[in-house]
Image (cartoon, rainbow, N blue to C red):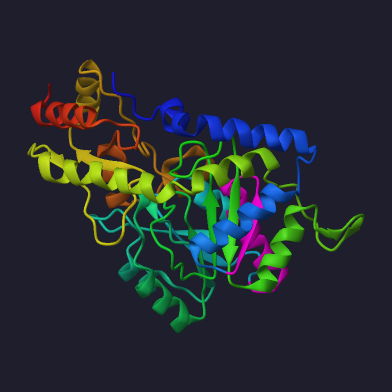
């Protein structure tokens, strides 16, 4: 059987180093706010080509805290509108509404599945104050076009980089949110996240907000929260960071074979316009559910990202009447093929052969 994602196999090459890093952390007797977290923050900032990194508990918190910090700085106000992609994972939108801000969903480009920059400007209103592009599946949005719109209209830009580790070392937005959930291209062995930015004031306030709104014990400037990365997760991430580019290169090799060798007329392959690290390799098929069952019978496991769009969720019932045809088409047809560095060449060939052998309604 070919797993969609086997985390044991993904982490096996680092097992000895991870165990040693964890042992060293345990022996240190320092489990929060220590050397491993501060070192990872510096290393991740350098890797991303930015000045500051603040570690936090998870990717959702990274998004939430940036928006909250901009509210505290007076750059956003409750009730302001934030442009978001309609076809993202719900965390991108939860972060907006959790801060009393208004998410404004925008349809994606039907070929790249990324937020359509051409549609952003048409959706602006006097209440629009920020854009939240999501580098979905591992491909970078058209940040040049997005930043041009943002500068023309004095908008903030928060990049959701949860799925795009290594896709770019030149992040253009005002801030970036990262998730190190175990299944990410750079994954911890538990939850972890971070914010990166070139704005020193923003980084300072984010650090305070993530620690109960405090920079000095028992003195609280803000009504903050508790959101922190622990030393063990930071130590693990430091071990794996050194191999991230190699892992991404292998994902790109696999995707390259899929691009060239999958020739089934019932399958639509993902378009690539910008650098792509293939956190997910999404194909479209009108007979998606049949295809998924067919592949499972062949011993190939797949996943669906994401079968119910945010505007169709009960959590956002006020949006249930809205229509986003491109987003709904993606939700009904998307299927993610295995695409990760633990796969062998034979595994890749088996996936290709199985997909190519699928026939309508089989």
Q: Position of residue 278 (x, y in %)?
A: 33, 47
Side of 141 relative to 25 (left or right) = left
Q: Residue at x 58, y 48 (%)?
A: 60
Choose between 118 and 253: the one closer to the eye: 253
The stretch of residues the image draws in magenta is 51-75
Q: Residue at x 24, y 55 (%)?
A: 110
Side of 16 relative to 227 (left or right) = left
Choose between 320 and 260: the one closer to the eye: 260
Choose between 63 and 216: the one closer to the eye: 216
On whether residue 62 falls in the magenta region, the answer is yes
Choose between 82 and 45: the one closer to the eye: 45
Asked if residue 175 is positioned above or below residue 300 in the image, the reply reads below
Q: Residue at x 62, y 33 (%)?
A: 20
The mark tally for this picture is 0
The N terminus appears in which quarter of the rendering? top left
Q: Position of residue 264 (x, y in %)?
A: 8, 36
């Amino acid at each position: 059987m070919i797993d969609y994602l086997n985390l044991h196999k993904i982490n096996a090459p680092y097992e000895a180093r991870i165990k040693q890093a964890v042992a060293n952390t345990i022996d240190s007797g320092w489990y929060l706010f220590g050397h491993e977290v501060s070192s990872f923050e510096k290393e991740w900032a350098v890797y991303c080509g930015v000045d500051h990194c603040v570690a936090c508990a998870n990717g959702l918190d990274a998004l939430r805290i940036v928006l909250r910090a901009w509210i505290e700085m007076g750059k956003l106000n409750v009730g302001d509108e934030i442009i978001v992609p309609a076809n993202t994972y719900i965390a991108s939108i939860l972060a907006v509404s959790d801060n009393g801000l208004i998410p404004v969903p925008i349809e994606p480009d039907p070929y790249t599945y990324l937020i359509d920059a051409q549609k952003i400007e048409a959706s602006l209103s006097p209440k629009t104050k920020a854009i939240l592009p999501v580098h979905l599946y591992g491909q970078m949005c058209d940040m040049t076009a997005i930043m041009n719109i943002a500068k023309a209209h004095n908008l903030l830009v928060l990049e959701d980089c949860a799925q795009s580790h290594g896709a770019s070392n030149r992040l253009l937005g005002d801030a970036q949110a990262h998730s190190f959930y175990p299944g990410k291209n750079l994954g911890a062995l538990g939850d972890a996240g971070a914010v990166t930015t070139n704005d020193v004031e923003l980084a300072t306030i984010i650090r305070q907000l993530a620690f109960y709104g405090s920079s000095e014990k028992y003195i609280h400037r803000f009504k903050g929260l508790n959101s922190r990365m622990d030393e063990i997760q930071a130590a693990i991430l430091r071990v794996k960071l050194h191999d991230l580019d190699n892992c991404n290169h292998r994902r790109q090799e696999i995707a390259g074979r899929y691009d060239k060798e999958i020739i089934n007329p019932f399958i639509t392959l993902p378009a690539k316009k910008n650098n792509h690290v293939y956190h997910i390799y999404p194909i479209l098929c009108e007979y998606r559910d049949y295809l998924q069952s067919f592949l499972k019978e062949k011993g190939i496991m797949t996943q669906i990202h994401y079968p119910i769009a945010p505007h169709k969720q009960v959590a956002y019932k006020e949006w249930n009447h809205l229509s986003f045809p491109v987003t709904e088409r993606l939700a009904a047809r998307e299927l993610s093929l295995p695409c990760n560095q633990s796969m062998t060449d034979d595994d890749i060939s088996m996936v290709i052969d199985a997909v190519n052998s699928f026939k309508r309604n089989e």
